[in-house]
Image (cartoon, helix red, strand yellow):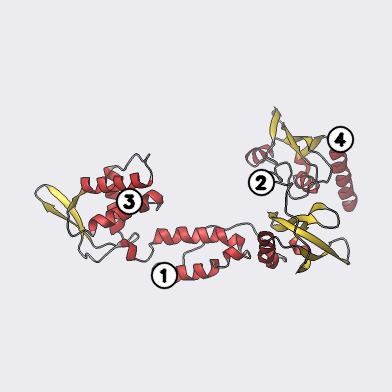
Amino acid sequence: MPTNKNATIRYLALDRCFSNPGRKYDINDLIQACNEALLDIDPHSTGVKKRQVYDDIKFIQDSKGYNAPLESFKEGKRAFYRYTDMDFSISNQPINEQEAQQLRETLTTLSRFQGLPQFEWIEDMKARLELSSRHGVAEKVISFDENLFLTGREYLGELHNAITNQSVLEIEYQSFKTDLKTLFIIHPYHLKQYNNRWFLFGLNEDRNEVSNIPLDRICTIRESRLKYRPNETIDFEEYFEDVIGVSIPIGETTQKVVLKIDRQLWPYIKTKPIHGSQKVKEVTEDFTIVELELYLNYELEAIILSRGEQIEVLEPSNLRDKIKERIEGMKRKYS
């Protein structure tokens, strides 16, 4: 039985009843206690059914739950419930198997943010969880697509602090295209992950425009004495809505992109759209035509090319020509 918010509230309400030496509780009393506890949390609660309370009692008694010393005794035709050990409380017990598994999955999810200062406690908490749990180490049941060996992750905490504390940074950067290093003065605004890489967005002091820097190309970071210029122009909640990836062409506007998708590929594109603006314009037995509205950039080209002959660009002509040129380049490589 899943341990959700309402279940925990019911368990605690039942626990108070079972450990109360001054009163006897039958099933109707327990239902009322659960309903009162649920209403205290949510005035719109519809309450709990008798079958659910019986299931809760079974779970509290079970070794996979709280392994409580719970007994049922009769007086006349009524059955009452109580702990045989009045010092027992589920609040004093080690976390049960389901709680431990839920915590492990939550910590696994949060571990994606390791490197940020707020998440330094994750590894310690995972170790303490295994020590405190009476069920030992559980098999990992969830994983994420990420590169733990990617360089630049070590800068996440420092950059996050700089954004939070509004500190200007001097970043020594080396492009893939040259052996020379470049010094940027950046007013850091935002960190974004795309395709298993992290990028820093900030105001470039020299260019007076927002630039993005991949963390894996950073060589050194130093704090500058310049006065921080806060972000007053970009809403990063909306900044990436019209783009795939992180490359937003300066001075450009979004364009309509029309793609012809082969029948075999369409089920995948239907369930995982290329972009949020994707709309179906035509469906035939052999292909589907979709329309997107977004910026043209390298990441869009990469997605189109990754699908090979199963996607054809119909519009705009400049994107079609660019894809054609790159395909011809590939063909020359294999000729």
Q: In the rendered image, which residue does mark 3 sit on?
A: 10
Cα distance between the residues tagged 1 and 3: 24 Å
Q: For the residue marked with disc 1, what is the amino acid?
A: Ser
Label 1 sits on a secondary structure element that is helix
Q: CA distance from mark 3 to mark 2?
A: 38 Å
Q: Relative to 38, is 144 on the left or the right?
A: right
Q: Residue at x 87, y 42 (%)?
A: 322
Say which amino acid is labelled 2. Answer: Glu
Residue farthest along the left direction in this orientation? 76
Q: Which residue is mark 2?
A: 237
Amino acid type, label 3:
Arg
Give the structural element (helix, strand or loop) at label 2: loop
Nearer the N terminus, badge 4 or badge 3?
3
Nearest to the observer: residue 97 or residue 178? 178
Residues packed near mark 1 inside 10 Å, few (<14), some (14 to 19) or many (20 plus) = few
Q: Nearer the viewer, mark 1 or mark 2?
A: 2
Rendering coords of residue 323 (x, y %) = 84, 43
Instruction: Tell me the amino acid under the disc marked 4.
Output: Ser
For marks 4 and 1, the one nearer the N-term is 1
Q: Are marks 4 and 3 in contact (CB under 8 Å)?
A: no
Which of the pair 18/167 is nearer the observer? 167
- Total marks in image: 4
Label located before the other in sequence (1 or 3): 3
**Which callout, 1 or 2, points at the residue further toward the start of the chain?**
1
Could you tell me which residue is drawn at 44 percent across and 72 percent down? 131
- Write down the residue under mark 1: 132
Q: Secondary structure at mark 4?
A: helix
Q: In the image, which disc is placed on residue 317?
A: 4
- Judged by depth in the image, the label closer to the viewer, 4 or 3, is 3
